[in-house]
Image (tube, grey):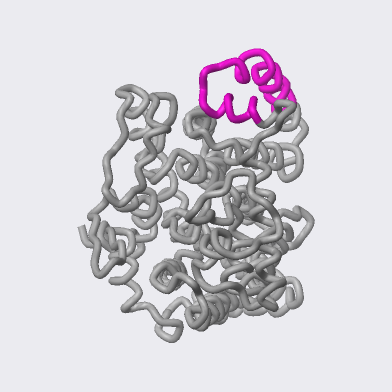
Amino acid sequence: MKGLFAPRWLIMLLPVLAALGPYALPLNIAGINLFAFRILILLMAAFSTPLTSASGWWFNKLARWTMLLGVLWLLCGMVSLLWTPRLSEGMADIVSIGFGFALLLVLLNLRAHESQNLHLLRIGWIVAFLATAAVAVWELATGQHLDSSMYEDSPHYFDGTVVQSTLARPEQYGQFLLVATPFLLWSFYEAKGPMKLIYAGFVAAAGVLMLFTASRLSFIGLAAELLFLVFVFDRRWYVMLLGLVVATLGYVWWTHAFLSSDLRIADKFTSALSDEGDGSIKTRIALTLNGLWMVYDTGGRGVGAAGFPHTIANADVPFRLERPKPEGRLAHNLWVQIASEYGILPAIGLIALLLLIAKVALEATNRKSPGRSREVRVLGMITLVGLVGYLFYGVVTGDPLRHSVHWMFFASLVIMAAHLYKARATSSSAARDPQGRALASGVVARALR
């Protein structure tokens, strides 16, 4: 029983609690939403510091730079409270960012980036997917949704053709499926025998559930993940042939059945492809351009934490919105929102981090590099697929910074990349000094005789 409750099992628990959100032990203290996911982070963060980690992760360059990015981001956010037009909302956003980087610190101190624990993270995402999928199936069967006072009601979605599972809105469940799919694919590559068919079924189930989320961008992002995996990262001829057959059948289904179906997501695609176009697409473009204008207008410092909606509603923005709202709109673009609210320093830091993760993951997929095991190559490939999904994740809904799933996925990407960075450093050292390694092995062997 002791091993069952060992701290490393919390690695598997965290993705599940992130997916359940406020449905798991909801609390509201002093205007701050606390639930099981955040409570666990608070409890673990109290015992997690860079200097007490026995795993020595502080000497992992990628993990160290990520935590320093968090410090920079939080500092810029707190300074921006001096000029933000929405002080209370800004403080709430900064709290969410703090929880996000505290989560990463907890995972690093739990040694989630080490080989023996990394698979617990993968299993946690699988369990989270199964839990949310069970709720989604219940929604489709009953036509009902889970109630929660902490979520914004969306009556126009409650028509029996969409699911939102344990997430706030159908689009957010689409986002969850988008970022959970890389872990389903990772499990597929790691599995053997009948388990491969089971994980392939999970991937197919994620695709089916995506049809009931009304999220076009998540749907496109899921297709992009699969296409990149098959035609860019995997590159085995029989996998590419199978992918080509499936893509052809998918295109036939798209043109002859999907667009004429009664699904809400099909209606949204049809309106976007019509001659008149879709007003939401034009609005998103205007929001992005106005966000970039805010960066320019403030000299790169940003309008302040959570200040984007107020600025859109009250400032004389240069790009007209097709669908204006009196209370303003969120950016619907994570990257532009960060730059427009917190300034260019955190935005550049985040982009640089993602490029570093992509570089490390791409190097890990190189079969010719010395010391690259199959496990490392697969993880590198899945990390790249996850980055593709993350690019789409950031432009689906208005405010990913407040989503627990966002921070869980961001932390998971960093954990996976930290493992790859450590593997790269180890293989490079071995390649530079093969004689020293052989000599050391001989000494150890003689000592054990």
Please determine whether, in this image, residue 444 is positioned above or below residue 377: below
Q: Pinpoint residue 246: horizontal percent, then vertical percent.
A: 68, 23
Q: Is residue 270 magenta?
A: yes
**Residue 27 vs residue 226, the one in the foreground:** 27
Q: Give the quarter of the image for residue 100.
A: bottom left
Residue sitting nearer the eye, 120 or 38: 38
On the question of residue 13 being in view, the answer is yes
Q: Nearer the viewer, residue 10 or 173?
A: 173
Residue 143 located left or right of residue 90: left
Extent of the magenta region: 242-271
The quadrant in which residue 233 appears is top right
Extreme-left residue of the structure: 1
- Residue plotted at (23% across, 60% down): 27
Task: Report the residue at 42% width, 48% height from top.
Answer: 123
Where is 274 relative to 52, above or below?
above
Instruction: Determine whether, in the image, residue 316 is placed left or right of residue 233.
Output: left
**Residue 110 picture location, percent across and down:** 40, 69
Q: Is residue 194 visible?
A: no
> Within the magenta stretch, is there residue 229?
no
Residue 340: horizontal and vertical position, in percent?
Answer: 62, 67
Is 241 left, or right, of 42 in this rendering? right
Provide residue 61's location: percent of width, then percent of height. 61, 77
In the orientation shown, which residue stands out farthest toward the bottom?
51
